[in-house]
Image: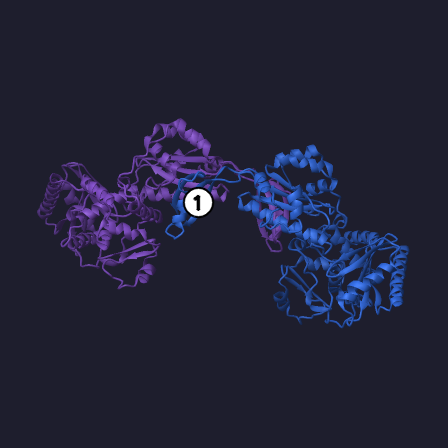
Chain colours: A purple, B blue
Amino acid sequence: MSAKVRDVCGKILGSVTPDEEEGQRISRLASDVRDRLAGEARKVGLEAEVEVGGSVAKGTWLRGEADVDIFMLLPPSLGRGVLEGECLEVAKRALGEWPWRERYAEHPYLEAFVEGVTVNVVPCYYVKRGAWISAADRSPFHTAYVRSRLVDQDLSGEMRLLKRFMRGVGAYGAEIRVGGFSGYLCELLVINYGSFLGVLEGASTWRRGEVIDVEGLYGGRPEEARVMFDAPLIVVDPVDRNRNVAAAVAEERLAEFVFASRGFLKAPSERFFYPPETAPLEASELVKRLRGRGSDLVLLTFTQGGLVPDVLWGQLYKTLRSVRGLLERHDFRVIRASAWSDEEGLNALIFEVESSVLPSSKRHVGPPALSREAESFLNRHLGAEDTVSGPWVEGGRWVVEKRRVYPDAVHLLRDKLIEGGKGLGVGSRLAGGVRESLEVMVKEEVLGLYASCRGFAVFLTGFLVGRPGWLG
Amino acid sequence: MSAKVRDVCGKILGSVTPDEEEGQRISRLASDVRDRLAGEARKVGLEAEVEVGGSVAKGTWLRGEADVDIFMLLPPSLGRGVLEGECLEVAKRALGEWPWRERYAEHPYLEAFVEGVTVNVVPCYYVKRGAWISAADRSPFHTAYVRSRLVDQDLSGEMRLLKRFMRGVGAYGAEIRVGGFSGYLCELLVINYGSFLGVLEGASTWRRGEVIDVEGLYGGRPEEARVMFDAPLIVVDPVDRNRNVAAAVAEERLAEFVFASRGFLKAPSERFFYPPETAPLEASELVKRLRGRGSDLVLLTFTQGGLVPDVLWGQLYKTLRSVRGLLERHDFRVIRASAWSDEEGLNALIFEVESSVLPSSKRHVGPPALSREAESFLNRHLGAEDTVSGPWVEGGRWVVEKRRVYPDAVHLLRDKLIEGGKGLGVGSRLAGGVRESLEVMVKEEVLGLYASCRGFAVFLTGFLVGRPGWLG
């Protein structure tokens, strides 16, 4: 390890390790909440084992960012009704004095805000390994597994380093918005490679479809896991060989992490952990850049609130792909596309296109010259009002030159999305918002939102740079 | 047969059948030339059978368009030296009082202009069927075959109708410029279908890969012929089952003939035989149309003389394909392309493109995100002067936005062709002319040549209409 690497890692470690005060405070808070939940459960005769889980139980959270996960384990004999009903009621009564809200993953859970700390109370079943009933049943096993691996060797610092690195390069978090590495996944990587730097060295050589099987559950036959999962990265769950812990990792995040790893090893720097904040450009500078690059920005905005982040982002990404396809089917060359949301109702899709206006004529290739379809093709196009020239035969097919229906991307998008984009692949949960509030802006028209919303300005500035901050 | 069809065919027949005077004059002329050739051969002791062949021998030529083909058949014992040397010398001495020139197909022959009639004197070998030595050896067999089929039934009128129809719809002639139906091919079609209208009715139902086997040399197994020849249209030569008489027929001409046949049967008209001449547009009207259609014309001209038509057109078409590919590789969307030549040294390639100017930025898709090539891709593009934004990862690949090297088609073509287009697929026999005289014009710059050259003006007007004259 070079002095530089040691120096950087030491500094970062100092910034991500909770001090004694925080450690004690969080532990006490977690115990208190657990005891309250257990007491309340006893009071109503609910048979539930209450456990602290997650990074607090493992001692691997990042300083100032503790989320307390508490699991209420029910015996499998109790039905879903108890899991989603009485158990949640117990939690609400136990934590009623703090602000809370019900959230939903596979099943509902409670999120409370206790003394400035987020506490998730997650009901699940107390089952034998593999006999999973609810999606959360694996979690206590994850906690137990990681703790068991930390008994002989304290890797918590290494895990914190990796989590902070992941956050710095934008790859931290399994939520749909990010499509990155979960905390548990980071911990497994450190266990597998033995250290933070070991992970980076390993990742530097990853290929697409890399298989990491910490506990050797595939007995040295990674190709079996590859067939089983078919994902860019496969990390076999030590507690369940049928689960890929890295299933949520998008190709993009994987590649970024790999190249960030190579980059850090070549030139270690704190900026991989704490990248400089993107400073939004001055509006006048933005205009200058837009004009200079010779492409056009097309911005769609619409309001649609009331969706939890994973649903919102799933819908936004789906809609982004659909609208991109619509543009490309109409010959607009899309250089790049991205989605943004303030997660409070204001949503935006942005497209950089080579040009938002196309020539008014286009070539339209028809059926094979002597096919059955040729006759109707000729009937349709010969002398039609929007036929510019032809039809003629070329390379064995009929070809005709047509007037373009939508030479302007703005008209295309307004026309096709005015009804909410039905049949175009716009997310169904967004269609109402699209129908009622869609605005389509082009080129410098994006300046309005840019000037009025800093979050969007930061996003757009990053979009225009178009490369990860740690890259070059 | 409808009265209308009978009426049209009757009129056309009247116009294409030589009158008695022409018939006698051509016959006498052919006999005279044959006798002179035979006499001259005898004089020098050249053992040669001299025969009138082609449409004159068969009585199937179009009025006013007789080409007299005369074959000098040598015994196979005489070598190529005699065929290409002494035999040709004999012909030159025999016809020396008229203007003549030496021409070249597979081997040299003599073209003389006797009393306003073109006479081709073609040396070949007197062989048994199938034992072909030179490419011209089949021709006397073709003549004999057609004559034998005309003994019982005079189909010469039907053949003349079909030839004129082919000429009218632009499909007559096996030369490379046309890629159409030879006279012999027309005769075989009439023999096969029994009449001119029979051919049109048959052609109306042709599919790609149609097999016509007049003498049943494939014994009712057309799929064997299809495997053997793999061409859009297959007409088995009655004198040689290994030869496709329709080998020269391009997909375009085939389709045009098929649709012209359907069109004529649906609405018979003399214009299929004698299409109205294309009247070039007024220059001012041309400008208006060019502006109105929203696309751009790009015109390349260069001078290159001294090539016989088949070589010239082969080279022009090859060059046309190459330059089209060059434009398309640089993202110019080519709607249509065509070549023109006055066959006296002035050549032109014309392209209609959606736009001759492209946006200055473009998306450039790189290697898979985690491939071995990714590193060098990043090194090449990261921070490069012509990188507009990125690189970023998208759909598993690195992508970068680059400044376009050639946003203007004119610059592209001038730059790439200034050296003659070496390595780009420009025909080697044209490279010198391209290097020394290339001019690239765009949009209304084409007006110069348009105004000064009527042949080009007619061509360009047809190009802009873009469909066969008999169509709609």
Residue B264 seen in the figure: no
Q: Which residue is mark 1?
A: A423
- Residue furthest top as drawn: A284
Query: What residue appears at the point 57 percent right and 48 percent down from the top-left corner?
Result: B325
Q: Quadrant of residue A95?
A: top left
The amino acid on which the numbered mark 1 sits, given as a three-letter code, is Gly
Element assignment for label 1: loop
Residue A404, x across and y down, in percent: 55, 40
Residue B436 falls in which quadrant of the image?
Answer: top right
Left or right of residue B238, residue A61 in this image: left
Total marks drawn?
1
Side of B14 relative to B182 (left or right): right
* The one of A344 and A149 positioned closer to us in this rendering: A149
Left or right: A344 as drawn, with respect to A63: right
Chain for numbered disc 1: A
Give the image location of residue B10, x and y in percent: 82, 53
| Whole-percent x, y for residue B427 in the image | 64, 51
Position of A257 compared to B149: left or right? left
The spot of residue A238 in percent (x, y) is 22, 57
Q: Is residue B413 visible?
A: yes
- Is residue A237 positioned above or below B42 on the image? above
Mark 1: give few (<14), some (14-19) or many (20+) Cα within 10 Å: few
Image quadrant where one finds the N terminus of chain B: bottom right
Work out whether residue A421 or residue A240 is closer to the camera in this orientation and state it. Answer: A240
Position of B290 relative to B5 (above/below): above
The C terminus of chain B sits in image quarter? top right
